[in-house]
Image (cartoon, grey):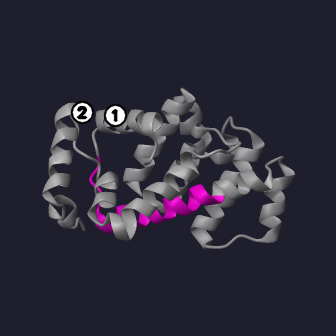
Amino acid sequence: MRLDILNNGYRPGTKLLFAMIRLFSGHPVPDAAKVTFYRPDFYGASAKEFTHEAMRGPSAWTVGDRELMAAYVSKVNETAFCIAAHTATATRAYQDAPRVAAALADLESAPIEEPLRATLRMLGKLTREGTVSAQDMRDVLATGATPQQIQDALAVCTAFNITDRLADAFGFAQLSPKGFEAGAKYLLKRGYR
């Protein structure tokens, strides 16, 4: 159910900003951005900072890897908006649409490195079941992922489990393919702030 608050719950200055973005970009402001403007003091400012750090902060994972993690977590959650948004962003970051599509279609046969595959497998289990074991962590470490990479991946997982639930609760509207592509360009250029 789409909540009307995403259309009308803003101060005049924010409404003007949204109008300017639409005018200059040719695309409406995505609901994922709108929700951070609705209550910036309660959710938006902190969420943007946390997500930006998880997705663009220092990490041994590439930006493409972290965007693929976001798309994968969103796929497990069956959140259409976030799947499309982060598939587009991962594809653009890697410059390799078949790789992204393969990882989302069949993780076990996808042409990706073993540390990434094991990490995605672990993030999927955590997202589905809400828990992972010490053995799950040992399995990821055994593929060559470092403890810091696991921590970084868990931050991505946290950010997108929250975002996916907001997308579902607020009924984020789907964008056109060009809208998702424009969003991907923006996220790669400016990040999540």
Report if residue 118 is visible in the image: yes
Residue 82 spot, x, y in % from top left: 42, 52
**Image point 65% across, 54% down: which residue?**
153
Q: Secondary structure at mark 1?
A: helix
Numbered tag placed on residue 182 in the rendering:
1
Q: Check the image and report above or below for 166 versus 56.
A: below
Residue 137 spot, x, y in % from top left: 79, 62
Q: Which residue is mark 2?
A: 25
Callout 2 touching callout 1 (CB < 8 Å): yes
Q: Secondary structure at mark 2?
A: helix
Q: Quadrant of the N terminus?
A: bottom left
* Residue extending farthest right: 142
Q: Nearer the viewer, residue 127 or 36?
A: 36
Q: Nearer the viewer, residue 167 or 61?
A: 61
Numbered tag placed on residue 31 in the rendering:
none
* Left or right: 29 as drawn, with respect to 47: left
Residue 101 spot, x, y in % from top left: 53, 38
Magenta span has 173? yes
Tell me where residue 125 sits by quadrant: bottom right
Report if residue 163 is visible in the image: no
Q: Check the image and report above or below for 80 versus 41.
A: above
- Report the predominant secondary structure element of the magenta stretch: helix
Q: Nearer the viewer, residue 8 or 116?
A: 8
Q: Which residues are magenta?
A: 154-174
Tell me where residue 43 sits by quadrant: bottom left
| Residue type at tag 2 | Ser
* Left or right: 63 as drawn, with respect to 15: right
* Left or right: 144 as drawn, with respect to 161: right
Q: Check the image and report above or below for 184 versus 139.
A: above
**Image point 30% across, 37% down: which residue?**
179
| Residue type at tag 1 | Ala
